[in-house]
Image: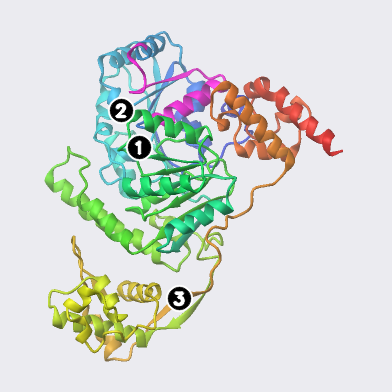
């Protein structure tokens, strides 16, 4: 069959998404490829379709155990023979999979990079026709990517050991120009077609909320979104434990995930979330890599991540089915210090030299600054993210900035008071003081430490006591952004005045800040989920089938497929095949039961 026929037959789609077809055609023509496509853009189709069209077996190298299990389950559901080899298999199952692979039982075999040089796998590779190798999460090969894995550096050595070099494809969701160059060089791609489809996910709403009352904000959000499933990311295990316990005590079906839990509990909790037994997953960034759960309607960040790559990857786990979803980051100044601590005390990548570790630490601190700017900007949030990856777009009208109304406010007088206060503190304490002490001094705090430091004796003590702490923080952030103030690097940063401050203090320069006139709720998504009786019945039927078969509901049909089904209301098998996401195999397997639900609903509504 031709690629489009394979797409329709197995996956139920008539047309390829942007970028898929040229990548597939290049692979089938024997040319290496590098595909940079955002989450939910359909990277997996780019290697699954060639796998069915090419002779022999396709090897998919991935670091993500959960992704392997989900994709293999989905492929087997539509009649494509696939399997995986990773540490989740016991010895007997591992041996059986190797043996069946040697017998040509699979069209796709997923393998973790650490397994490539095991004797059993090398024997399989030598005895099997491997026509194509797909490297998923290819940014892991670059030490400048956000998830560098030394095991990826051995992939090119594995290729050299094969009797014949297969076509090689590398795929990732996020990659800067430097990372793309590393992928081509380190994987030794030969004259690859390099295609970047763009990083935009129009169905995602992006929001930043400045609050110190994060627990209350999340409880309020969950109350307004009781029917939806989502993830709350926290920076530390301690935050995960505390927030999960609070949500459970308030009656929410929440579970937790972090590296400190036993393997057994992590697996149980992940399955509870994937199978919709728990509606909310509270987790560190250890959770989510390779999770293919399509019906995640929101991703909340309790703390600011360390960089925009991680944030966009984690936020991108929302809305994989194409439905409207929300990605909201709760920000407080303390998040910056937490992120710095994690960067400066990271023990990752033990194989790196001290020199490389120092370079990566410097890079991570620079990327943290860009992450912090995202949290404080009054520009379009989507523009800010996409410009980081080299893509320019117009304001999106679907983020907390674009949906708010801002006006320019002259803060020259307040700026002069802040700069004068910092300068006077530095005269009293030449080594300088931290941001928190400056804030307390300007607002006239009677805290013991402020009094011990004799800050209450300064003329600027309490000079801005009429401003809220939140607003004063925004003014200081603006002065840092404009380089009138600077925060020193290191574990104990202090706030200092720069030479440029003279322009405000003595030369009449004005300072303005954009402040919201009317704040639109950051919890508002791009559109509301259809509240249709038929859609509700279809989802209930899907859940029954999923429980009977022991698979996640989205593996039966995605939310987007059920929404299209509810919209088109097919009453015949021919009409059902016109629904996006319904292929021949699933139509034969599930078609009659879903058609029965549709016919029954239509009769009830007559």
Q: Position of residue 95 (x, y in %)?
A: 35, 11
Task: Determine the image quadrant of residue 147.
Answer: top left
Task: Determine if residue 205 is in view.
Answer: no
Q: Which residues are magenta?
A: 65-92
**Which residue in the protein does label 3 denote?**
514
The residue located at (34%, 29%) in the rendering is 263
Task: Determine the image quadrant of residue 155.
Answer: top left
Mark 3 element type: strand
Q: Is residue 522 magenta?
A: no
Mark 2 vs 1, N-terminal side: 2
Mark 3 vs 1, N-terminal side: 1
Between 158 and 235, the one lying in front of the other is 235
The residue located at (58%, 25%) in the rendering is 547
Between 534 and 54, the one lying in front of the other is 534
CA separation in Å, label 2 and label 1? 11 Å
Q: Are marks 3 and 2 in contact (CB under 8 Å)?
A: no
Mark 2 element type: helix
Q: Are marks 2 and 1 in contact (CB under 8 Å)?
A: no
Mark 1 element type: helix
The nearer-to-camera label among 3 and 2 is: 3
* Residue 518 disc label: none
Residue 327, compared with residue 163, is above or below; it is: below
**Which residue in the protein does label 1 denote?**
138
**Which residue in the protein does label 2 denote?**
113
The residue located at (44%, 19%) in the rendering is 83
């Amino acid at each position: 069959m031709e690629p489009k026929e394979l797409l329709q037959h197995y996956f139920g789609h008539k047309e390829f998404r942007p970028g898929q077809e040229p990548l597939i055609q290049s692979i089938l023509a024997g040319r290496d490829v590098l595909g940079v496509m955002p989450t939910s853009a359909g990277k997996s189709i780019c290697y699954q379709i060639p796998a069915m069209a090419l002779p022999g077996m396709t090897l998919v190298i991935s670091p993500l155990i959960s992704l392997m299990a989900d994709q293999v389950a989905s492929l087997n559901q539509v009649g494509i023979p696939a399997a995986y080899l990773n540490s989740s298999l016991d010895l007997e199952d591992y041996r059986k999979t190797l043996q069946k692979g040697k017998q040509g039982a699979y069209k796709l075999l997923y393998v973790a990079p650490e397994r490539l040089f095991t004797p059993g796998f090398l024997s399989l590779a030598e005895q099997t026709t491997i026509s194509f190798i797909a490297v998923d999460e290819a940014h892991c090969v670059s030490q400048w990517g956000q998830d560098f894995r030394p095991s990826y550096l051995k992939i090119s050595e594995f290729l050299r050991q094969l009797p014949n070099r297969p076509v090689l494809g590398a795929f990732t969701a996020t990659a800067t120009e430097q990372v793309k160059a590393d992928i081509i060089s380190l994987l030794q791609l030969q004259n690859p077609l390099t295609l970047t489809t763009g990083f935009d996910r129009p169905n995602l709403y992006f929001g930043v909320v400045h609050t110190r009352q994060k627990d209350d904000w999340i409880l309020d959000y969950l109350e307004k979104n009781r029917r939806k499933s989502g993830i709350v990311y926290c920076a530390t295990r301690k935050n995960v434990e505390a927030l999960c316990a609070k949500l459970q005590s308030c009656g929410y079906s929440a579970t937790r995930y972090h590296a400190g839990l036993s393997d057994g509990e992590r697996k149980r909790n992940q399955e509870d979330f994937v199978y919709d037994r728990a509606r909310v997953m509270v987790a560190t960034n250890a959770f989510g890599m390779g999770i293919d759960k399509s019906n995640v309607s929101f991703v909340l960040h309790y703390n600011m991540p360390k960089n925009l790559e991680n944030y966009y990857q984690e936020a991108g786990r929302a809305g994989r089915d194409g439905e409207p979803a929300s990605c909201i980051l709760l920000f407080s100044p303390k998040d910056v210090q937490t992120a710095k601590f994690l960067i400066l005390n990271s023990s990752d990548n033990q194989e790196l030299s001290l020199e490389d570790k120092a370079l990566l630490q410097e890079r991570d601190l620079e990327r943290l600054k860009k992450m912090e700017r995202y949290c404080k900007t009054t520009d379009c949030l989507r523009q800010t993210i996409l410009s980081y990856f080299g893509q320019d777009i117009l304001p999106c009208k679907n983020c907390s900035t674009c949906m708010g109304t801002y006006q320019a406010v002259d803060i020259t007088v307040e700026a002069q008071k802040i700069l004068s206060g910092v300068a006077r503190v530095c005269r009293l304490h030449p080594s300088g003081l931290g941001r928190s002490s400056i804030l307390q001094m300007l607002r006239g705090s009677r805290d013991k430490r402020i009094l011990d430091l004799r800050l209450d004796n300064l003329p600027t003590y309490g000079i801005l006591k009429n401003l809220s702490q939140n607003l004063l923080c925004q003014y200081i952030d603006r002065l840092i952004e404009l380089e009138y103030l600077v925060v020193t690097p290191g574990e104990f940063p202090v706030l200092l005045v720069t030479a440029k401050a003279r322009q405000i203090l003595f030369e009449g320069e004005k300072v303005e800040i954009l402040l919201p006139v009317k704040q639109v709720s950051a919890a508002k998504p791009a559109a509301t989920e259809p509240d249709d009786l038929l859609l509700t019945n279809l989802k209930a039927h899907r859940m029954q089938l999923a429980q009977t078969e022991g698979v996640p509901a989205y593996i039966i049909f995605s939310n987007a497929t059920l929404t299209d089904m509810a919209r088109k209301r097919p009453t015949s098998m021919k009409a059902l095949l016109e629904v996006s996401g319904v292929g021949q195999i699933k139509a034969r397997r599930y078609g009659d039961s879903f058609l029965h639900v549709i016919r029954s609903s239509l009769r009830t509504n007559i």
